[in-house]
Amino acid sequence: MIHLEMNQAALVNTRFAISPLSTTVGALYLLRSDAPPVGGGWRHLIRETVHDRQLWLLKALFSGSWDYVPDFLTPQPDAPEAAWAEEAHTVATTCSERLCWELQIMAQGITDEGLAGRPTPTILRRALERGERDFAGDIATELHQLWESALAPRWPALRARMEADIALRARTAAHHGLSGMLAGLHPRVAWNDDRLSLVTRFQAQIPGSTSLVLTPSVFAADLHMVIDPTGGPTPRQPMLTYPVLHGPDTPASPAAHALLGVTRARLLSDLHAARTTAELSERHFLAPSTVSYHLGILHRTGLLTRTRTGHRILYQQTPRAADLLADSPQAR
């Protein structure tokens, strides 16, 4: 379990940011053999681009079964939407101390926090022998090539999905408070006692945070938290990357209607934002008992999350449900 202490300052400074670089790094996780399926041919596109452009450092970093991938690849955005050039420059100018420290964690792990290490691939060791500055520059160059070839041409559609998701989260916060929005980000996020908890096999206690940056991801099926383990140089404030939901007007696909039935498909489609049984009953002109019956089935099949906030129970789509409902991939 990872616990992030959220005092008043951290709550006040919680913000969303869209990051082209974090999106690019998120796409690189599709290189892993255990990566979840993503529509639109993205996995093939990323793998083909990495091979054709000979992005061997990125392949070595992301195709292994690492518990930890260096966080210098995803610097914290300073603005609501970061500029690619500024983010890439931050990567290229990463200080040697931080770069070596993070690569050491990747290779050796941290026993107390449950991070397992893996032998460093030869290509990474040889690149490091040329010096940390050159290594960071080479990584930034490869990231730029992947961005220009695979993501930049499709960025307007990707950005639109993230903007729509942020709008949905803002609406949830307006109706259910910031704690309700945070708890609804993902089934593995819990909020209690001024503390944000991530249900995971890793162990960490993050005290003294003064801010939290939330970055939506169109590629992730799970959470990714950028935090500094104990003893890191120039500690960073935490950043949480979470999977986006589909927009509010995303219709249920014919396949979803056939598989779920019309009523359940419509209810599931409406749960792009967290809602209660009573809200769904009013919106769809159904008896509360009928809504509860359908929600129970959808929850048991893993298509809904269920979160208690005070006396209210909120239901929301899972990424699996969003994929089922999509008539065609949103990002092409």
Image: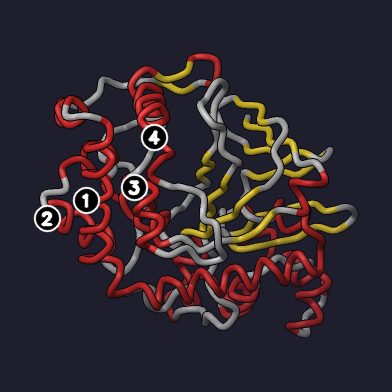
Dot label at residue 53: 2
Instruction: Determine the CA span between mark 4 and mark 2.
Output: 27 Å
Q: Are marks 1 and 3 in contact (CB under 8 Å)?
A: no
Residue 34: x, y in percent? Answer: 33, 42
Instruction: Determine the CA span between mark 3 and mark 4.
Output: 24 Å
As drawn, 130 above or below 86: above
Q: Secondary structure at mark 4?
A: loop
Query: What amino acid is at disc 1?
Result: Glu
Q: Look at mark 1 in the image and give the residue it sits on.
A: 142
Identity of the residue drawn at 26% across and 47% down: 31
Instruction: Determine the CA span between mark 1 and mark 2.
Output: 8 Å
Q: Secondary structure at mark 3?
A: helix
185 on left or right of 9: left
Q: Are marks 1 and 2 in contact (CB under 8 Å)?
A: yes
Q: Look at mark 3 in the image and give the residue it sits on.
A: 29
State the residue in front, 237 or 322: 237
Q: Secondary structure at mark 2?
A: loop
Q: Look at mark 4 in the image and give the residue it sits on.
A: 95
Query: What amino acid is at disc 2?
Result: Arg
Instruction: Determine the CA span between mark 1 and mark 3.
Output: 15 Å
Point out the residue furthest to the right here: 311
Q: Secondary structure at mark 1?
A: helix
Is tag 1's residue or tag 3's residue first in the polypeptide sequence? 3
Instruction: Determine the CA span between mark 1 and mark 4.
Output: 18 Å
Query: What amino acid is at disc 3?
Result: Tyr
Q: Number of labelled discs?
A: 4
